[in-house]
Image (tube, coloured by chain):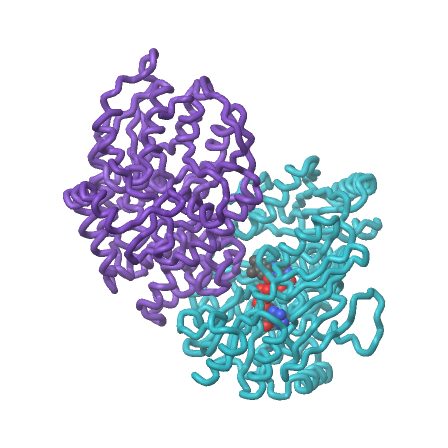
Amino acid sequence: MTQLLDELYNIVGREHVYSAYSDRYCYTYDASFCTVQSGNLPAFIVHPGSVEEVSQLMQLANREKIPVIPRGAGSNVSGGTIPVRDCMVMVLTRLNRILEIDSRNLVAVVEPGVVTGVFQQEVEKLGLFYPPDPASLPFSTLGGNAAECAGGPRGVKYGVTRDYVLGLQVVLPDGQIVETGGRTLKNVAGYDLTRLFVGSEGTLGIITRITLRLIPLPEAKQTMLAVYDSVDGAAETVAAVISAGIIPATLEFLDQVYIKNIEEYAHVGFPLDAAAVLLIEVDGDPAVIEKQVVKIEKICRQQGATQVRVARTSQEAGDLWQARRAAFGALARLKPTVIGEDATVPRTNLPEMVKRIRRIAEEFDVLIAVVGHAGDGNLHATFLCDERDQEEMARVDQAIAAVINAALALQGTVSGEHGIGRMKSGFLARQLGPAALGLMRNIKRTLDPNNILNPAVMFGEGQE
Amino acid sequence: MNSDLSYLENEIVKCIRCGACQSACPVFRETGNESSVARGKVRLLRSALQGETPLNPELSDRMSLCLMCKACTPVCPSGVKTDKLVAGARAAAVATLGLSWPKRLVFRVALKQRGIFRWGLKMGSLVRKLLFRPHPSGSGVLPRVPLGIDRRRLLQPLAPHTFAEEYQKSMGFKTVPTAKPAAARVALFTGCMVNYLYVDTGKAVVRVLRRNGVEVVYPADQHCCGTPVRVNGDLETAVEISKHNLDVLYRLDVDFIVTPCASCGLALKQEYPELLKADRDYAAKAAAVSAKTRDFAEYMVTLPDWQQGLTALPGIITYHDPCHLARGQGIRQEPRSLLQGIPGVSVVELMPKEQCCGSAGSFSLSHPDLSRRIGGRRIDSVEQSGADTVVSGCSACLMQLRDGIIRRRLKVETVHIAELLDRSYGSAD
Ligand SMILES: Cc1cc2nc3c(=O)[nH]c(=O)nc-3n(C[C@H](O)[C@H](O)[C@H](O)COP(=O)(O)OP(=O)(O)OC[C@H]3O[C@@H](n4cnc5c(N)ncnc54)[C@H](O)[C@@H]3O)c2cc1C
């Protein structure tokens, strides 16, 4: 142990290695509801400062068969950075330089520890746009986003992280440094390794550099909010807007539990008996979006919206978003434990999914609020409970399983954007089937024969 | 007061571990280590509460890594008040592990006994010569001996006479220099920084208020507000000090209690009522004093004619928001309004907004390197702003900024807002 510590000190410098109990304890959790059994602490926390250091650390870990948990901001909600006993947690936040923003080729090169929101601000200063917008963007890292293939409200129009990663530099479990993809939009040289590593949740390699695609910043945007007394009205609106040839930048859906709580907490003027609210944003050429707003407003009313508010100023738009952002605080005030599920269905199955969630809430007697990125069918069934109440938590567990099964039955996926991590490894086989799952295990075994990289996530091996 | 942590439980369970505090915490920004961010501290406390993590010196040490700057509370979706949790944890640590001897000496002996306190002041100039040497720049002093203080740390020298002494000697007997009858009567609560180090700030406050037709009384038996002992976990002394001050302030026949110190204002407005909420005799007194307390800038802008008689001051001024004023008391616009009221100055904003200067009272003494790194970022902002003068409403912030400015050899002045106004009124001596 002391000899290992000395080696770590040699690689990254003493001040970048933590081995005191309190420091190790603080890497036993992430934003998920997953917990480790006491005693299953990491052995060291290491903060490398270069790809060479990452490579040396991996060689050491591979030689000594020390499990390694890569980590960005630890904001994932799937248990993706929960340690295994005596592992090394490798924190990549010191690698936080934006290496290049090439506005002529619309490409940027970043290190994995760059905070998503910081990067967005920097490119926007140059009139450029990096659309993926997980709600955690003020603190999540681009490395974590790539490793989880994070999405966000803008997914419906702009896609998710995967759609913006052109190339990667990755350190493999044995310490080899590989480059995947490149900086061209078109690139068919060999297998698409970039896509293999995006969303691999730290199980195949450590991402040490990311080449990202950028697009021009839309000139303008407009925000509107529509209130419905039935979920179907809101869902039909989503379908009708898209059929009319308009793809809004965001189409956020809030259900009655959210609405009631937001109203009571933040007094934004929602009718307390509303069944659903849609927050719609269109962006692009000002003249075009002006017309789109008129069309959308008409569609909303045709589909039975009881109230439609169009923000005329950025201040008003801010107020509407304020309501959306108040959602979380409004719920956190009700119950101490908030678990955000992200089973996702094709968007036409959304009303049915919402109904099934309501039924599940009744059946298991649990409190579930639903918020969703309605445009892409990505729902967040939000479970409100108290983790200290074991009996309640047992019911919550059952209800979560029921929600996931409902999504699968409706041609959906167990996770739209949060990842499998530890929380959902048990459901993976059901969605993939044995052949696809077997192939994935083979890929993992080929790249990481000693199973040292994030061994307990994805396939659920060695979870304690 | 509770020596265990259980009364903190309801606050602790609110943390949903999202990690949003990582974007706000100035200490985490320097260390990158999870145990120094709010989420880490809350998790450690939760584990201590469950008996899994011992309340030992290592845990105390992690709890010492908090500036009490409240930057994490507005970004927290569930509104966890980590500064309160850390204060509670420090109190539990004091109850379990005791105070370290230097703190015990200062908090329990010197601060509590007004006799010793006064004697210490009388001896002040002698002690000062023994312990401090002048800074080569001629501004401020440096410690001669470790004192638990970094020896390169610039400190404001103890004033030759405290504000209390000066007031007794001169100001107290001056008649109100205004033709109008007194518009209001206020009590001045100076705080230690102004009383012992920045006496000129206190004098400026008195002159500016009197000039505006406000009658100022100075209750000479006021004491330290207790913030240093409270945030370091010595609740017993904090309660004692707050009761003393409430006894002094409660019986005064004044309209308002005005203070030029952000932390004292926060103590009188919020901390006393909270410390004493279960006290039968003092809860009401604390509420009454709280309702009357105003920060200097907050009070000034309510005076009808404060803009009259302000003369032009050249220069580019920037304003540093003290954490305990902006996030603590919600006072952001008032000081800016005052600055904009001075003819001739142009006011520029310090970006990013509302960053802690890293002083945090005794934090700057116990974690000098971290404190200086955090402060260095604020000095970067000052440099980028192009300002030639930094104004603030907190003497401790100003001392920290001065240290950084001298270290970088910048030509930038630091001044309390009361002194700047005084200068603009043309009444400074
Ligand atoms: C309040 C809140 C809102 C959220 N909103 C959204 C949302 O809207 N959409 C969404 O998709 N997610 C959301 N998330 C989840 C989370 O923020 C994302 O999964 C994010 O991408 C995680 O980034 P991170 O830097 O915190 O990574 P971490 O949590 O530290 O790590 C995530 C995973 O990536 C791996 N990893 C991290 N860095 C590297 C690297 N450099 N190389 C290889 N592997 C690595 C880790 O091992 C782990 O498996 C939200 C979370 C919170 C708390």
Chain seen in cyan: A
Which percent across, then down, holds residue B412?
A: 49, 40
Q: Is residue B385 visible?
A: yes
Q: Is residue A355 visible?
A: no
**Image-quarter location of ligand 1:** bottom right
Write the residue at 19% across / 49% down.
B110
In the rendered image, the residue lying farthest to the left is B115
Asked if B409 appears above or below A46 in the picture, the reply is: above
Image quadrant containing the N terminus of chain A: bottom left
Answer with left or right where residue B135 lies relative to residue B118: right
Specify the quadrant of the image occupied by residue A174. bottom right
Write the residue at 41% across / 37% down.
B393
Write the residue at 49% across / 69% down.
A29
Which percent across, then down, holds residue A191?
A: 80, 78
Asked if A399 appears above or below A220 in the picture, the reply is: below
Answer with left or right where residue B73 lies relative to residue A423: left
- Return the residue nearer the eye: B310 or B129: B129
Which percent across, then down, holds residue A31?
A: 53, 64
What colour denotes chain B?
purple
- Return the residue nearer the eye: B292 or A154: B292
Number of callouts in the render? Answer: 0
- Return the residue nearer the eye: A356 or A383: A383
Which percent across, then down, holds residue B175?
A: 26, 17
Specify the quadrant of the image occupied by residue B215. top left
Answer with left or right where residue A158 lies relative to residue A85: right
Asked if B7 appears above or below A90 in the picture, the reply is: above
In the rendered image, the residue lying farthest to the top is B179
